[in-house]
Image: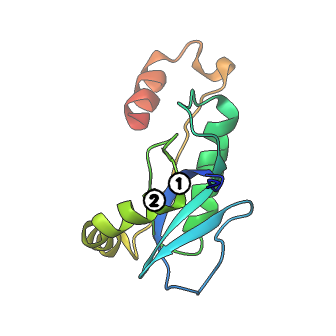
Amino acid sequence: MAQAAVTALRLYGVAAVESGQATSLTEGTTLVHYRALAAIVEPATYSVSSLPVEETDRYFSVLEEAYEHSAVLPAPPGTIFQSQATLTRWLELHYFTLTEALSVIEGHSAARVSITMHAEAGNGDTEAHKSFAALAA
């Protein structure tokens, strides 16, 4: 009896998407549907991820693009499921918790702000530097 090849899946997040509504929210990913939820995934090797800079950048870009289309609960970076069946079972087990969490964040938005100071502006003005550091914190 031959065994079917198993493809591991890298999970980026879970979105509120009706079944059949979309096949993908971002380029290079697919959706694994379970009722009103969909896991945003892409094929990956089943191994411990060291999260190099390229993977981290990809993680953020996928989530940002997906958030433009739907509310998204991000998965911890580097989360990999052994198979689609395992992921579907996980979605089934946590369906009500995930649905409730998505209903809480739906309609809310987030922003990322980065404050930097030019080197020449911060040389003599330590009070301004402290003020910007407090604002950034």
Residue drawn at x 61%, y 55% is 1
Q: Nearer the viewer, residue 59 or 85?
A: 85
97 vs 62, left or right, is left
Q: Residue furthest front?
A: 1
Residue 22: percent from left, percent from top? 63, 81
Residue drawn at x 57%, y 26% is 50
Q: Nearer the viewer, residue 99 or 1?
A: 1
Residue 78: percent from left, percent from top? 52, 40
Question: What colouring style does the render use?
Answer: rainbow
Q: Quadrant of residue 51?
A: top right
Residue drawn at x 67%, y 61% is 29
Dot 2: within a 10 Å radius of its alpha carbon, few (fewer than 14), some, or many (20 or more) residues? many
Is residue 7 visible from the viewing direction of this image? yes
Q: Amino acid at mark 1?
A: Ser
Cβ atoms under marks 1 and 2 closer than 8 Å: yes
Dot 1: within a 10 Å radius of its alpha carbon, few (fewer than 14), some, or many (20 or more) residues? some
| Local SS, label 2 | helix
Q: For the residues marked 1 and 2, what is the alpha-carbon distance in whole angstroms?
A: 6 Å
Q: Quadrant of residue 56?
A: top right
Residue that numbered label 1 is attached to: 83
121 vs 77, left or right, is right
Residue 87 bears which disc, if any?
2
60 vs 15, left or right, is right
Residue drawn at x 25%, y 67% is 97
